[in-house]
Amino acid sequence: MLKKLQKWRYGRRYGYEVLFRRQDHTIRGRTGIILADLGMPEQHDPSFYTRFMDHVFSYSLPSFIHPIVLTDRGIALIDPGNPLARESFMPDHLVDMKGSFTNREGRPYAECKFKWKAPGMKRNPSDHGYFLYKGDGPGGAPEICQKTSAKVAGWYYGHLIPEKKIAWASQCRKIYDMSSAMLREKYPDAVIRHARYMYPESVREAVDQMLSEGCRTIIYQCFCNPVYSDFEDYSLALPMVHEYVGNRAKVICADQPGNQPPLRKAYTDLAADVLSEIPSGASLLLILSRHGHPFRKETLDLRAPQYTVPLEKEMRELIEMRPGRKEIVWSNDEFADEYWDPKAKKFSTYMAYRKAIDEGFYFAVEIPVDFIAENTDLMFLHAIKKFRAFREYDPFKPVPYPDWDKPLRRIFREGQTTGIYAGCPVGKYSSLVAEAVYLSVAGVLNQKT
């Protein structure tokens, strides 16, 4: 009864207020450590994108609307040659969420009977339509989720990614390997497992393995999010761990890695290396970009200053050493446009680049401080929205990224302004990210003594 009352009282903040803030940090018995990340796969897996989008809509929409919006009446299809279409057209090729251009019989979808479905959010210029094919029955996921996965399969992996692979899983695995090695050296009796919280089965497997090895305390930490949010951490991953553990062991959530100085140093070192390539005295706008969110109340906003305030201070100390004109701005890649933010309360990364161009800065350097690894959001979805500030940016041009041990650097020019996207703190910066993960977990483990 108490649990139900708490969930009713706190709603989406139940995970933060009850499971995190009120947790007892006293460790008992053998300890298991789950180090988790989002789980974006290296090669296209339609289930990842359909699961993620299903969570987006399930989380953001009232429950009574779910049966209407999250329907599966057939197979959602996208034309990779015109993936962002908002008006009906005659497609040349159609692809489904699995990357197939043909139906069960091997007939091209483009030759089958299909129906155009207009964007669900008609006023949102970023939403797009899709085609619906019913000849083979349901598609296996809500259509609104299928269309995203079909776009990723046909356009991202089919055209924009020359290597046909995304770096996220590989770069996250290196963080896990380094941080788990540090933990094993200091705490050799601990059981450490990797999990991907968008794949609940991997979380359940990690929990079951720890319980089978006699763990009576399980420490959970998400290492891919510098700041924890209700959307991914407190309302999704943490309750999931508690559910799978049940009453068989104690669960402790280690704090967000953004509270640790080494994580901030990873970004300031990355910024310092980029700035070292810029002529001394050249005017500089340093853009600290975040993902952004559309929610009125989000614990992320409450906890972000523990990360962003000292990070900004350290970034200011970095650029103060440079002569000439310089400025720092914070920006949001998402949910800061006219549709999501009609009162212009937020500052978009697009507007940050436009500020640099309109005010004559010679360089605009963007550091995406919410991400520890490269992913399809940064490379394509966010890129479409922010890099349109530069006329030379072409959203249909492939984005090669052959060396995952180096940050992905993207450079655009407009007028006298050179925009530099600095990429994520991977490669030589990864050890600092791993150290932050280690310190967060060790902060819990050290209370044992």
Image (spheres, rainbow, N blue to C red):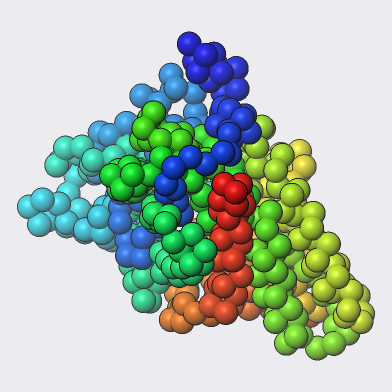
| Above or below, 42 relative to 362 | above
| Above or below, 417 relative to 157 | below
Query: Which quadrant would residue 76 be assigned to in this image?
Result: top left
Residue 11 is at least partly visible in this image? yes
Q: Position of residue 445 (x, y in %)?
A: 56, 50
Q: How many marks?
A: 0
Q: Position of residue 313 (x, y in %)?
A: 83, 62
Residue 360 vs residue 19: left or right?
A: right
Who is closer to the viewer here, 241 or 365?
Answer: 241
Residue at image point 80% right, 66% down: 314
- In the displayed image of the protein, which residue is found farthest to the front? 449
Q: Position of residue 19 (x, y in %)?
A: 55, 31
Residue at image point 32% right, 61% down: 44
- In the displayed image of the protein, which residue is found farthest to the left? 105
Residue 394 vs residue 330: left or right?
A: left
Q: Position of residue 5 (x, y in %)?
A: 54, 13
Who is closer to the viewer here, 18 or 162?
Answer: 18
Residue 129 is at least partly visible in this image? no
Who is closer to the viewer here, 308 or 333?
Answer: 308
| Above or below, 42 relative to 346 | below
Residue at image point 58% right, 39% down: 25
Residue 277 vs residue 208: left or right?
A: right
Residue at image point 92% right, 82% down: 323
- In the displayed image of the protein, which residue is found farthest to the top? 1
